[in-house]
Image (spheres, rainbow, N blue to C red):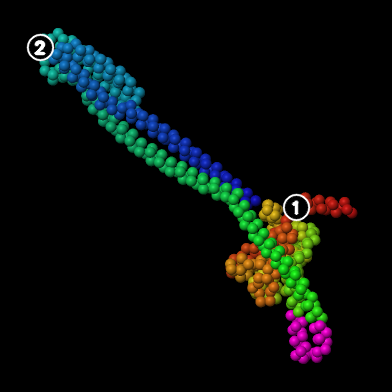
Amino acid sequence: MNVKLRLYSFAAGILLLAALAGWAGQTAWQKLHQLRKSFGAVQTESFHLAERVEASLLNLNETMLRYDLGKDPADRAHFHAGSEQLKRWMKTQRAFVTTPLEHDLLTQIEAAFEVYLIRAAKLLEERALAGSVPSPKEVLEKVENTGQILGLCKKLKTVERSVLNQFVEDSHEALGGLQRLLMALVVLVLILGLTATSLIYRAKIAPLRAQLVESRAMIGRQEKLASLGTLAAGVAHEIRNPLTAINVRLHGLKKSLIPGSSEHEDAAVIGLEIQRLDRIVRDVLQFARPAEPRLVRVSTESLFNRVQHLLGSQLEKALIQLRLAPSPTLWIRADPQQIDQVLINLIQNAAESIGRNGTITLRARSAPMALAGHATPAVILEVIDTGKGIPPKIQDRLFDPFFTTKEAGTGLGLSIAARIVEKHGGALQYQTEVDRGTTFGVVLPRVESHEREAEAQNSVDRR
């Protein structure tokens, strides 16, 4: 359930990042479009109206003076064509001015230009009939003093400069905002890519990799156990026969010895060593050819209660508390005696790790686990101790047969426990931390409620 929740959270995060990236991209596009429109307005020379009017007016004045001096009809026609062109151009520029003040000044310039044209036409008529030639200054004064166009153009220049400065500031601010949006978009895309990669890795690659590593470790361990098992079975059989003969002869020899004598004590020591050897042989044979489990439906609570009853009083002598953690009632299909053997071995190892003054906790929980290559509803029987933990250099050889750190150990306890659990279709796992403790988990397939009901119904039908 936690894995699914994390996956859903990752997916929601990716969708949120994608939405943010889309919003940032759309906003950046809108700002870019607005900037393009604004720069398009600059290209229409909307900020240079006054200069155009001044230049045209000076050109008309120059044409008027040439006509006054030379009386060339072409100059007069050129004056009329230029003035009409300037009038039309000023009308078309009304659509491009951006402020009310510019619009008002342009209207005043148009009105003054109309007055200018009226006075210029009158002056041209007068000069066509006059015989004397006035000075250029006199001609210009008669026209410009009434129009006041150049003064209005000067005011318009000031307004245009102010509008242009404001436009530049707004453009810089818009470009800065666009730059920030683009940077945010790049960061969001990078985060989105990394998050998507992490999600794909967690959802697909990591489980496959863990499963592959686990499968390789299990195959290697099984191959090692198989080869050792074959060798151990042959050696155990060869040792057991002479060992039995030695034990029989020793039993007869002890009857002829005087109790309390040194010879009798030596025979007792030999008897104890023979028993130890016989126990080792039995362990070797159990490791080499473990018995097939007789599977029955059993609850985790009954398993824990049984091993607590067997070992609780013994552990109390070492001030070690064996307690049962609150756990739900879970059911498995197992051989109770073999699982008891596994739990007893794990509890005894935990007690040896603690020494004195500690706690061993038994807990059962349910979780989906990878068993036989695919996810399976499973029950984990946990043995949690407060001991010294397992050093890293020992962890790699923890399940190796005949590897032990105990003086009187055979090194087969965990190997036998692992083989028993594997025979049940499960796995034996552990987590450890030096000076903090170790948790061993016996992972077994869980019996679902519908399977229990079907089994109960079959039992009733058989009756």
Residue 369 is situated, as x and y percent measured from the top left of the image, at 67, 55
Q: Residue at x 78, y 88 (%)?
A: 264
**Which numbered tag is attached to residue 50?**
none
Q: How many marks?
A: 2
Left or right of 345 on screen, residue 259 = right
Q: Nearer the viewer, residue 413 or 54?
A: 413
- What segment is highlighted magenta in the picture? 249-273
Residue 365 is situated, as x and y percent measured from the top left of the image, at 69, 58
In space, the residues marked 2 and 1 are separated at their CA atoms by 124 Å
**Which numbered tag is attached to residue 132?**
2
Q: Residue at x 83, y 87 (%)?
A: 255
Image quarter of residue 64:
top left
Q: Residue at x 81, y 89 (%)?
A: 257
Residue 85 showing in the rendered view: yes
Q: Residue at x 75, y 72 (%)?
A: 236
Outermost residue toward the left?
132
Residue 268 on the magenta segment:
yes
| Label 2: element kind | loop
Residue 271 is situated, as x and y percent measured from the top left of the image, at 77, 82
Q: Main secondary structure of the magenta part?
A: helix
Q: Disc 2 vs disc 1: Cβ atoms closer than 8 Å?
A: no
Q: Is residue 197 above or below residue 48?
A: below
Q: Nearer the viewer, mark 2 or mark 1?
A: 1
Residue 101 showing in the rendered view: no
**Which numbered tag is attached to residue 448?**
1
